Image (cartoon, rainbow, N blue to C red):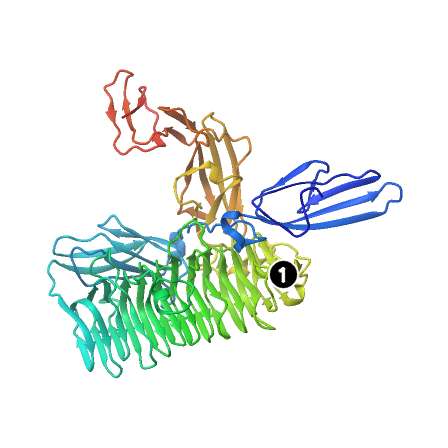
Amino acid sequence: MDGLVNQGVYADQITFRIPSQTGYETSASLDSITVPVDAWLGVTDANYHELRVRRSALASSQTVETNLAFIVYASDRGNTEWGLPRFTPPPPINSSAGETAGLRLVMVAPAAFPTGQRLPVVLRLERPDGYPAWLNGRGVLTGTSATIQLRRGFGSGRLPAVSVQSTQTLTAAVHSLSAQRSITFQASPPWTAWSGKVSETKSWPSRSFLHLTNEVEIAAGAALEIGAGSIVLLDAGVNLVVQGRFSARGTLDEPVVFMPWDEARPWGGFIAQTNTASIELTGAILTGGGGDPLYFQNHFAYTHRLEQAVLLLHHGAHAALTNTFLIFNSGQAGNGWDSFLTLDQCVIQHCLTGGEFEGGSVEIIRSGLIEFPAETDQFADADEDGLYLGGGPHTIRDSLIGWTRDDGIDAGAGAAGLVTISNCWFEACYHEALAWSGPYRLAQMDQTVIVNCGQGIEAGYGMSPDSPIIHAQRILATGCAVGLRFGDNYNWGYPGFLQVTNSLILYNQRDVWGMTWQDWTWRTNQMDIRGNFLSAPNLMHPTNQVWNPSADANRLAPFTPGPPGVLVGLGLALRSGTADATQFHDSVPVALSSFSTRVVQVDYAMDQVSGATRRGTLQFLPGEMLKPIPFDPSVDRKNWIRLRLDNPSGAEFTGLQQVFFKPEADLKPNTLGLLRAPSGMVVYWVEAGWSLDWALGPAGPWQAIPGAISPYAVAPAAAPQYFRLHR
């Protein structure tokens, strides 16, 4: 080969040539696709590639075959994705009205609240039995300009501050579901400034208004209790140091709220570092904490993130949180070392990470851990995990983890232990939903859904003779770059074992992947993948069945978050109705709110300035959630393009139905163009700070169109219409 070596690793691209040889017939294939010889070939696709070259001697017909494996990786993502296709989790598509039928919407907000502060609000979608409903929705808050996005049943927000003393009824709605809360906004509540040491037992009554101006310490043997509906504002960096017992006795109707006195200056957190410490939070909202960006650098030798945790538990401390919500905090949500934490019906959202817990025990029940730190398409490799777990035993059941810029659960270096996952949902984790590695790690998973993640289940590097050991059954993994993976993206050791049975591993770019970069081998002897349904035959794992959508669709029923067969939500998997065409080299993604047991179809039209329209139909088979609309090479990207979806079958539009792609080349200054298509007309321009005017004649009079932004839809009229840009 010219320019290519076996097991080579290349940043962003590789160019090579397969030379012919006199007296031989030479043929070659790259990733099973025939390629020419004696021509320079370029590969830019970040992925693992295999080149097979076959030479047959013309005189003797003797044949020699050479196989070369190599990796092209995306340099902006470093070595974290060696051998994997570039993957970006799509934004959520809201669920349909039919999917949410029969559920209930729960809203949590303070009953009494000071004016001048943003109001924290939490929404949950629940089944009649109180368990989470794995559905997306847009929570509309009537009487305000705010909405709250629910991700698989969980969401939170902060409403604009109310400046006038009043009592207001706040109503939230998702389709036909609604919830109400009456809130009294007080202009001058009776604040009690307080700090210092609690040496005995102290109680603050319900609806207290406390201002903590400095550190509060609860001594061993002492107790502090705060009553329902109380508001606790803390000055910058203020901590609550717990050596005895602390309890907040709130309810869903009257939560206890901890938040900063000045939102621009976060408070600290709860600090419990002794086995005499006990923290009980019921019906509480903790927001605006974690204020020290270098807390762990200054106080401890090592942790993956340096930022302060709102809930720090070390050396045998205990914490039990029920219906408690850690939202919009500057640092980590939690950090534990040989301590004990229970979360029941809680929400952790918009923190840097859900937390790192080494040793002790963590139990999470009916809770949602999402957006670390926020849902985005921006890549980062910064340990922004849902949870980082070491030691154990740890248990997570009936819970959601998703929208993380790193892993859902990372169980890497640290003490040995067992992690049990049951009836959970993982979604939109940039790297792995479940990244198992480290010494003597044992993980058991059952009845769990993994969608739209970089990798679903990974049995990664090990640090002992036989770890990690992973057992999973009744798993659905769909829409991921890789569904099941033995190995990791580093050239380290892999002594563990991955067993997955009785599962549906469907429509991933690779359903099962077993390559390791320590020796560039597929570790079939360390994988037991059998009795599953895969999208296509896998010669490395032959004891599985190939998914037949028409015959096997009902097998999805135990996993569907809504009633099987109901219309699901549908939309373009984009974050804006205007995008750059350069972001989409080959295709544009379309997504469902959930996989369906029925076939879903939608038509699409790609309109161009020339008047040409490219049409087609997408079909989602049972189990699929994400499909691409191909960009035809003949599409003119030098002008605006409109892509529109129409005529859904088996679904209803709940997401973006159309998108406008900006031209790849800059338009000439002051250009005002017209895009005309069967679905309507728009005028477009690129100059910032210009206004659009219209008139009935070329001489005017001209009238400004308030708020017009490019592209702007125009409707045909009986009389001619004229448009101009004006500055």
- Drawn side of residue 97 relative to residue 634, left or right: left
- Drawn side of residue 566 relative to residue 265, left or right: right
Element at label 1: loop
Farthest residue in the bottom direction? 221
Near-viewer residue (707 or 464): 464
- The quarter of the picture where residue 539 lies is bottom right
- The amino acid at mark 1 is Gln
**Which residue shows up at 51% across the image and 32% down it?**
614
Farthest residue in the top direction? 699
The crowd level at tag 1 (other Cα within 10 Å; few <14, some 14-19, many 20+) is some
Q: Is residue 511 visible?
A: yes
**Which residue shows up at 52% across the image and 44% down it?**
628
Identify the residue under disc 1: 518
Farthest residue in the right direction? 59
| Residue 207 in the image: above or below residue 454 | below
| Residue 719 in the image: above or below residue 206 | above
- The quarter of the picture where residue 373 lies is bottom left
Question: Horizontal and vertical percent for residue 305?
Answer: 40, 62
Q: Is residue 558 visible?
A: no
